């Protein structure tokens, strides 16, 4: 059994490779933003990368470095095969192959920031693939979730407001995020009083969880 990097009454985080650390598989609901091949070279025109070239992701401070395994969807697909057909919510790109899950609904995260991600068409959105079991948290039949990225922690950082909305919609049980990144899914689950377990390969990002939970301040602005 692997020793947790961080643990409290609600959240457990492991440092390592989710294909080797399997404690997250004991959870009930998957909510994750995996590496899905956004650094692959496209065969269409001059576009390179699903959402930007590798070098654009490296700010030189470690926080903007390229994401391990993001040159293909192989790591994502192996993790999802391990998860099986249980409830899942998975981020991806509309310009790349869908994740291998039984998709019941597709949401769109509109990043709102004009000119994001390069390319002549200025894609600024990501798809969110959802299996059966998730529920709407309001009567609004809106599939586009709009909020600025939170890149101060991670180049692919998701807004806390966005992740809170998605975790709220998840069916009962423990939340799993095997690609925890800056741990926003875990922070959202903690705020909602839900148990969650995560795995993160980069130890620098692992260290953010305790820091973020210790702040005791949650900003839910910017979600429309």
Image (tube, grey):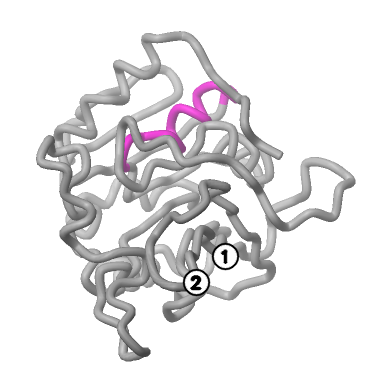
Q: In the shown orientation, is residue 44 left or right of residue 220?
A: left
Does residue 161 lie above or below 39 as drawn? above
- As drawn, the label of residue 121 is 2
Nearest the camera: 170 or 215?
215
Residue wearing tag 1:
129
Q: Quadrant of residue 206?
A: top left
Let me know if residue 188 is in the magenta part: yes
Q: Quadrant of residue 221?
A: top right
Furthest residue in direction left, as rendered: 60
**Can you say which quadrant of the picture contains the N terminus?**
top left
Nearest the camera: 83 or 48?
48
The residue depicted at 52 percent of the width and 69 percent of the height is 85
- As drawn, the label of residue 200 is none
Does residue 85 lie above or below 181 as drawn? below
Does residue 219 lie above or below 103 as drawn? above
Query: Can you give x and y, in whole percent of width and height, for residue 113 in the image?
Result: 51, 47
Magenta segment boundaries in residue numbering: 181-193
Q: In the shown orientation, is residue 153 left or right of residue 126?
A: left
Q: Residues within 10 Å of mark 1 (few under 14, many from 20)?
A: many
The residue depicted at 62 percent of the width and 59 percent of the height is 108
The residue depicted at 30 percent of the width and 73 percent of the height is 73
Query: Can you give x and y, in whole percent of width and height, for residue 187 in the image?
Result: 45, 27
Question: What's the distance in space between the residues labelled 1 and 2, CA to CA?
Answer: 23 Å
């Amino acid at each position: 059994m692997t020793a947790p990097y961080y643990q409290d009454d609600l959240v457990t985080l492991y440092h390592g490779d989710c294909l080797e650390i399997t404690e997250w598989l004991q959870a009930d609901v998957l909510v994750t933003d995996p590496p899905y091949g956004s650094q692959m070279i496209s065969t269409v025109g001059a576009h390179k990368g699903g959402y930007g070239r590798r070098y654009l992701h490296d700010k030189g401070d470690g926080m903007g470095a390229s994401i391990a395994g993001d040159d293909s969807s192989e790591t994502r697909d192996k993790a999802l095969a391990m998860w099986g057909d249980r409830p899942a919510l998975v981020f991806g790109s509309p310009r790349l192959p869908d994740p291998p899950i039984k998709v019941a609904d597709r949401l769109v995260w509109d990043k709102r920031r004009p000119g994001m991600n390069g390319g002549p068409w200025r894609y600024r959105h990501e798809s969110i693939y959802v299996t059966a079991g998730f529920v709407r948290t309001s009567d609004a039949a809106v599939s586009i979730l709009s909020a600025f990225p939170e890149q101060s922690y991670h180049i692919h950082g998701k807004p806390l407001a966005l992740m809170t909305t998605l975790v709220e919609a998840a069916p009962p049980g423990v939340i799993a995020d095997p690609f925890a990144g800056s741990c926003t899914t875990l922070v959202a689950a903690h705020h909602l009083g839900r148990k969650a377990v995560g795995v993160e390969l980069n130890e620098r990002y692992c260290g953010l969880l305790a820091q973020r939970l210790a702040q005791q301040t949650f900003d839910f602005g910017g979600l429309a």
